[in-house]
Amino acid sequence: MIIFSILAIILIITLVIVVHEFGHFILAKKNGIAVIEFSVGMGPRIFSFVRNGTRYSLKWIPFGGSCQMLGNDEGIPDADADIKADAEHAFYNKSVWARISVAAAGPIFNFVLAFVLAVIVVSSVGANIPYIQGIIDGGAAQQAGLQVGDKVTEVNGETIHLYKELMLYLQMHPGETLNVEYVRDGETHQTTITPAWDEESQRYLMGIQGVTGLCYDVSVGEVFQYGFYEMEYSIVSTIKSLGMLFQGKLTMDDFSGPVGMTNMVNDLVEDVSESTQGEDFGTRALMMFVNLANFTLLLSANLGVLNLLPIPGLDGGQLLFLIIEAIKGKPVSSQKVGLITMIGFICLMVFMVFVLFNDVKKIFI
């Protein structure tokens, strides 16, 4: 099982990164920027070919990929004579808006991948509609008039599209009085709920019961609608998690690198295998695919959000310098950009080593 999980996480991470780099590639080509090499994998080349001035490579280490552009800080021009490009096609000689589009394309393509995967998941298993699945007798929800089958549409002014959005809101606002809007038999109603403290679970309870992952059949048109909601949830939950980190509600131990993600995928694979025992091969394969696709869409959304952070060494850091250039009408000094980017890159490497150490520590402790 662990071998399958390792192969799965390698394919998942490679897909997410290659799609990200493909976004840079497409916009670079569209804006006339010379792409020196587009590669799948890392390390030495297994094989490659050159077409229209770009070398396309498959590399030995099946992990990630890259898009090297002429003149970009992250690009390293290849020495082969057949793929050299002149300065006219260099990244730094294009308009600031062309460069902004190239830098932003990677994260945007990650969001597009998340949406495509979300549509596939919803079309396969249904939508995570926020119906009340169960009511605790005597609980706050029952006292406020909620019933099984009610569809929650808004909490304290925040629109709710998915059941897990409701759960996330309750998790992030414990004990807060809830002004709830819900639909019953086609009619919209409002009520106020004050979650009660539960000694046994040591947390505030709204008084509802349910399964976060429960899904319902939807029409063809709603597949795309709820696919968008799933993508939106993945992006928003990532942003909220970062906010919780800065607020001290999360610690660095809550972050995972490749080792930690492999363990997560392995747990997911084992859970699906156990829950589908006795089912036919087709059903088991479908459920495994859907769960891995769901994990991939969350990872793709995470990568898109994290890459937009204004941190030197990430796309967001480059976008920050380009936006400053667009406002001031002249580029930031290349020496300053190089120094800040190098410092940012070093900090990212230290962070990655720390996360890797944390992942390994969790295995043994």
Image (spheres, helix red, strand yellow):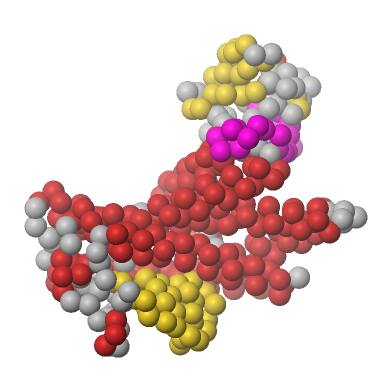
Most distant residue in the front direction: 52
Residue 255: in magenta span: no
Q: Which is more toward the observer, 208 or 27?
A: 27
Q: Which residues are magenta?
A: 197-226
Q: Residue at point 66% right, 42% down?
A: 123
Q: Residue at point 75% right, 22% down?
A: 148
Q: Which is more toward the observer, 126 or 56?
A: 56
Q: Position of residue 219 (x, y in %)?
A: 65, 32
Residue 330 visible here = yes
- Vertical placement of residue 321 versus 7, above or below: above
Residue 200: in magenta span: yes
Q: Position of residue 182 (x, y in %)?
A: 61, 19
Quarter in which the N terminus is drawn: bottom right
- Vertical placement of residue 219 versus 252, above or below: above
- Vertical placement of residue 180 versus 334, above or below: above
Q: Position of residue 14 (x, y in %)?
A: 52, 68
* Apparent side of residue 272 relative to residue 164 in the rendered image (left or right): right
* Apparent side of residue 284 relative to residue 338 in the rendered image (left or right): right
Residue 165 visible here = no
